[in-house]
Structure formats: structure tokens, C-alpha cells
Image (cartoon, rainbow, N blue to C red):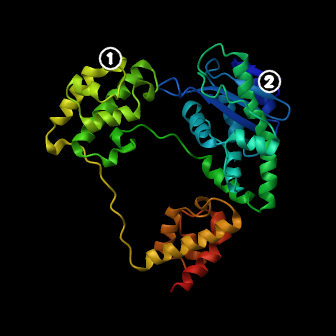
Amino acid sequence: MRTDYKIINTASGLEKAVRTLEKTRAVAVDIEADSMYHFQVKVCLLQMATEKLIVVIDPLQVKNLSSLKPLFSNPDIKKIFHGADYDVRSLFRDFSIEINNLFDTELACRFLGIKETGLEAVVERYLNITLDKKYQKKDWSKRPLPKEMIDYAVGDVTCLLNLAKVCEKELEKKSRLGWVLEECDVLSKVRPILSDEEPLFLKFKGAGRLKSKSLAVLEAVLRFRKDIAEKKDKPLFKIMSNDSVMKIATAKPVTLRRLKGLNALSGKQIHMYGNDLIELAAGALNMPDNKLPVYSQKRPQTFPNEVPKRINALKSWRASKVRVLGIDPGIICNNVLITSIAIQNPVDRRALGRIKEMKNWQKKEFGEEIISLLRSLK
């Protein structure tokens, strides 16, 4: 493991590092955040590595990272991530950093047909390096950070340069590099979901199975949990687990005895939140029927008889491609795309080009096969 890294904790140090980083053609990037410890998640460490330089940027001390923006937006410099979705969203959320020329080694591994695509697994597979993940769930917002934690953070990012080279070489052998580059371009444009006024239960697993009164209790408890988490600056699960929330919503307890009987909360939680929770449940149950929340279920689409026939034919075609290519069927053509193709029924290149959900690489690689298949069904 390389330990010749530079810790950047001043604006002048960052500007100097950027001048060096901008001279390279590829830079590996990784972040550490504090999602396990705080309500408002933030990037706590930003690691960047080239062949000659490794920097560990501390955004808790260097508040303004705007000098990094030209580097990340420069299309001539490849930015290498592993599992970039979270990092891309976080860098935009915290620093308004936008990324051009992204290469995601995790995505590349999926296109190579690898089942276990976690960094630890693929680094061992391709580079014969064993990564130690013991600091993965530590609190990265604490200062000062022990040297062992910084060493750990550097260990991940320094593997990415060689991993990217291996992945690109393997993808070129299989003529799939262009596929991945297009997917990476799409990935580079993901953004964090903005908070809105939608009910919280809409993003809560299992809410769709609840009746209106339980749904009202669920929404009240979720809002209560969120308020407490924000005040205490703790993640939601450290206030109350999702399982506990669901038990309360289902049972709708209006007495402390009933709440205790659920075995959903610890004695400490009942002492802190018990009275509030039974009041919330009682208030939700007293809501008039016309004010109760409703989980709007999407009605299944009804199609003409020929559409299901096309869907089945496309799925059979996809299964044959999976056997040939050895990659996940969702990568070749996911179910949403299959349904869209079946509905629009493109029987020539122009019609195929109008399917917005379809990537260019999919049209180029599979377009003629799909058109021929659909024509044969007429």
C-alpha cells in the first residue's frame, strides 16, 4: 500500500495540488462520508490519485473546493470511480462539482459479466490485492483522523488506476468499451433527489400494503422520527429502525402498555418517545375519513393482445443474448425497455431511433435483431 500521500487542509495547498493533477490524463477518485453518524450527510474526505501523486483533501477544513471544478469538468482528464452513483450525487450536492469523462470500474465489471462487483472482490480478482474494510463504517467526520483510517482511504483509491486499465483492456477484447463509456456518461449526470412535500410513506418499504388508518399512523411516526433525527443530528435508523416504525404503524398503539407489548422499542426509546408516539397514533386514528392518506396503487397497464406476445418474444431473445454474452439480462435490455419496445413496435431503424429509453449502444448492437424479430411476429 502506498503511503506517500499528501494531506490537503488549506486552500493554497489545494490550488497547488490541482495544478499538478491537471497535468495528468487520468485521476482516480473516492470519497468518505458520514451517513452512518449524522442526519445531514456530508463528504468528509476526498481522495484523488494519479500515477505520481496521491492527495487526501479534507473538506471539513478546506471549505471551498471550487478550484476542483475545472479538473472534474475537463473532458480530457478521465475520472475513475468504483460505484460512482453515490459519489457523483454527493460531489454535486456538497460542492456543485460536475463530472465529464467518468469511468466507473464497478459498471465496467458488470458489463464483463462479473457477479461480485464490490471493490474488495474485483481488486482481489484482477490485481491479487486484499483490501482491509475494517474502517468502512467508521465516523469520518471526527477530527483528527487516525493515520490508520487515512491509510485505509488511500488504499481504495490507489487500486482504481490499475483496475481501470484491466477493465478497459477486457472490455476492448469483448468490443464492449463503447457500451460502458455511454453508460458512464449517463451516470455522470445523476443528481441528488431534492426534498419535496410528498408524504414520507411513499418512499417507505411496505407502505403500499397498509390500509388508510395505518398509513396515517405511519406518516405521523415517520415525520416525528425525521424531526428528532434532524434535531439530534443523527441518521434516521439511530432514532428508530424501519421495522419498529412498521410495527407501530400496523398495531396503532394508543396506550403505553400496548406500545410496550409490541417489543418494537427499547425501554430507553419508550421513555424518550413513548408518550409522543401514542399521541400521534391516537391523533391519526381520529382523522376524518376524507383526510386519511391513500397509497395510490398503479393500475396494471392494459395492452392490445399483440403487445404481451411481443414482450414474451423479446424476453426469449434476451435470454438467448444472456447465454451468448454472459452478462445480466437487465444490462442487455431491462423489462421497462422491453415493454416500451413492445408497445412502440419499431419495424425499421427510424422507428427504433424514436425509443428514448434505448441507449445508442443498444440500438447499434441489437437494433437489427430486434427489428427482424418484431417483423417476424406480424
110 relative to 127 in the view: left or right: left
Q: Position of residue 71 (x, y in %)?
A: 72, 36
Quick one: which residue is furthest to the right in this view?
52
Residue name at image x 67 percent, y 47 percent: 116
Q: Position of residue 11 (x, y in %)?
A: 69, 20
Tell me where residue 196 sits by quadrant: top left
Q: Which tag, 1 or 2, sits closer to the chain's start?
A: 2
- Name the residue tied to disc 2: 5
Tell me where residue 5 sits by quadrant: top right
Of the numbered discs in the image, which one, if any, rests on residue 37? Answer: none
Q: Is residue 374 above or below residue 235?
A: below
Residue name at image x 80 percent, y 58 percent: 172
Q: If the image is split into quadrants, where does the N terminus sit?
A: top right
Is disc 2 placed on a helix, strand or loop? loop
Can residue 198 be seen from the camera position used here? no
Q: Residues within 10 Å of mark 2 (few under 14, many from 20)?
A: some
Can residue 3 be seen from the camera position used here? yes
Q: Residues within 10 Å of mark 1 (few under 14, many from 20)?
A: few
270 relative to 284 in the view: left or right: right
Residue name at image x 70 percent, y 68 percent: 324
- Name the residue tied to disc 1: 272
Residue type for callout 2: Tyr
Q: Position of residue 52 (x, y in %)?
A: 86, 31
